[in-house]
Amino acid sequence: LSASPRGLSMRSVHIPLSVILGAMLLLAGCAGAPESGKSVTPPATTAPPPSRPPGAPPPASRPQANEPPSAIDEGMSSFELQERLNQLGYKVGTVDGVLGPRTVEALKKYQSDNSLPPTGALDVQTIKKLRTAKY
């Protein structure tokens, strides 16, 4: 580095980008590393969520007798959405909980067929119609 009367000149600093990125990665990796000489307790493992049998609806919490029902009706899981669309003839394929293009297109078709705005988004009106639809 060459010095100028005012300090370091920016023209004289030539550090390759790969060196800077390597240093950043090294420092980021060290940030979570334990200090030497200290014991580390391994993180607690959590059990995977219990799987449910195919076709079984997810458990839903219902209001108690003295509680009014919620205005939004808890929402709908992606599994339940795919299951209902399949039951009603809007084929989304495998019920996997992934809101991919087939699920979104099936939802748009269902909304269009049921006088709802075909947004592909799950709103309160669509949930109510899906839950009360006969198959």
Image (cartoon, rainbow, N blue to C red):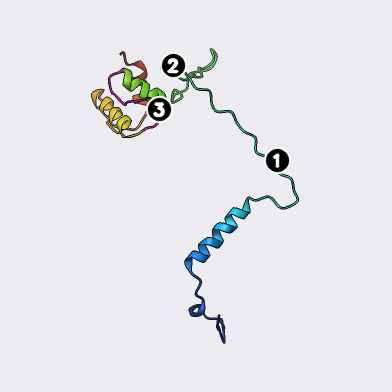
Q: Position of residue 58 (x, y in %)?
A: 46, 20
Most common secondary structure along the magenta stretch = loop
Magenta span covers which residues? Answer: 88-99
Query: What's the CA distance linking mark 3 and mark 1?
Result: 35 Å
On residue 32, the disc is none
Sequence order check: which comes first, mark 1 or mark 2? 1
Of the residues tagged 1 and 2, which is closer to the observer?
1
**Is 104 within the magenta?**
no
For this orientation, the residue located farthest to the bottom is 5
**Is 90 within the magenta?**
yes
Is residue 36 found left or right of 16 in the rendered image? right
Sequence order check: which comes first, mark 3 or mark 1? 1
Q: Secondary structure at mark 1?
A: loop
68 or 59: nearer the viewer: 59
Q: Position of residue 43 (x, y in %)?
A: 65, 38
Residue at screen point 25% across, 25% down: 115
Residue at screen point 37% across, 21% down: 83
Identify which amino acid the numbered label 3 is placed on: Asp
Identify which amino acid the numbered label 2 is placed on: Ala
Residue holding disc 2: 56
On residue 41, the disc is 1
Is residue 109 found left or right of 73 in the rendered image? left
Residue holding disc 3: 96
Task: Name the quadrant containing residue 81.
Answer: top left
Residue at screen point 31% across, 34% down: 101
Task: Name the quadrant containing residue 107.
Answer: top left
